[in-house]
Image (cartoon, rainbow, N blue to C red):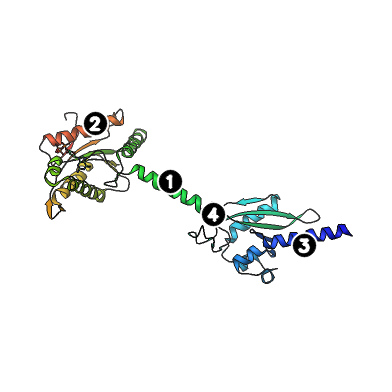
Amino acid sequence: MSNDLDAMNELHWLIDMVQTIEVGLIVLDRNYNIQLWNGFMENHSGISPNSIKGKNLFTELPDIPADWLKQKMESVFLLKNRTFISWEQRPYVFKFKNYRPITGRADFMYQNITLLPLASLTGSITHISIIVYDVSDIAVNKLQLKAMNQQLEELSQTDGLTQLHNRRHWQECMEREFERFARYQDQASLIMIDIDNFKQINDKYGHPAGDKVIQHIAHLLKQSLRETDCAGRYGGEEFAIVLAKTGDTDALYFTERLRKKIEASEIICDNRIIKVTVSLGINEIKPNSDNSSVWLSGADKALYQAKQNGRNQSVVFTTQN
Ligand SMILES: Nc1nc2c(ncn2[C@@H]2O[C@H](COP(=O)(O)OP(=O)(O)OP(=O)(O)O)[C@@H](O)[C@H]2O)c(=O)[nH]1
């Protein structure tokens, strides 16, 4: 008698706990009709256990990705094995609003889900349990950390004044492009750009005005680039670009258009108009280029030649440079 009472108590406690636990519990039969729907599910869906019992899960909650979840559940029935669905795989299965104060930034509740086969007294799998864990805190923290890391990575690759790639990152990009060429024999051209007589601009208008000129050139440069091109601030008043899939004839067309655009533009600083020009050196990858340094130094030599020739011009590297 006392054993019966103990067992009854245990069952009663268990039912109480199932109802109040901060985890969603659902039991479905073979046709996905709901047999159990605990307090957590009621609180977050607004649907009471009495009103949903015996009804089909997918009819009652049409937001659930039915085909996808059925496929998972069928394999649980078939293999008699539990399955886990992580929030990283699918942020949620049940579209519940997120009310947590800490993770107020998430609109919905991130969920980890376990699908558990339930055996009848005869041992056959007649039902399935869906266990829903609210993992919004973990998910939001992880996503925030990921976003911050991404931001940090971008910052570590970006030049603060111009928002172009910084020298180190540009160099990596250039080396990648060089290796790609070595593998696929693709065309690519490297361009070095230097602002003409920049020291005089600093001396005449002041360093802040000089900075503004650098930003202005970077802005015009960005406007001229394609998605696949890679541009960076190589030094103080020097920029470097890799034009993907571009031979030196097209690169020259690009640099001349940019040069003329810069020449025609003006920078207004403290009510004064500043006009600048740039010199540009171009070097197309050659099939016999040994390494990326040779490619870079070819463009640098062509730039030097452009300066020697009187500035405000583009020069294509040849072995005579
Ligand atoms: N305002 C500003 N000036 C910089 C920056 N970095 C380098 N400079 C200046 O840029 C000038 C570069 O001058 P030089 O290399 O002598 O060449 P240049 O006057 O441009 O003459 P050419 O290149 O021969 O046409 C130096 O005076 C540097 O101090 C920067 O970030 N901002």
Query: Is there CB contact under 8 Å for labels 1 and 2?
Result: no
Q: Which residue is mark 3?
A: 12
Classify residue 161 as left or right of residue 273: right
Question: In this orientation, which residue lies closer to the viewer: 281 or 49?
Answer: 49
Query: Is residue 206 in view from this perspective?
Result: yes
Q: Which residue is mark 1?
A: 149
Q: Mark 1, mark 2: which one is toward the viewer?
A: 1
Question: In x, y percent, where is residue 262?
Answer: 17, 48
- Which mark, residue 137? 4
The residue located at (85%, 60%) in the rendering is: 5
Q: Residue furthest bottom?
A: 51
How far apart are labels 1 and 2 at the CA level?
Answer: 34 Å
Element under label 4?
Answer: helix
Q: Which residue is mark 2?
A: 297
Picture layout, residue 6 above or below residue 196:
below
How far apart are labels 2 and 4 at the CA level?
Answer: 52 Å
Say what amino acid the circle numbered 1 marks: Asn
How far apart are labels 4 and 3 at the CA level?
Answer: 32 Å
Question: In this orientation, which residue lies closer to the viewer: 54 or 50?
Answer: 50
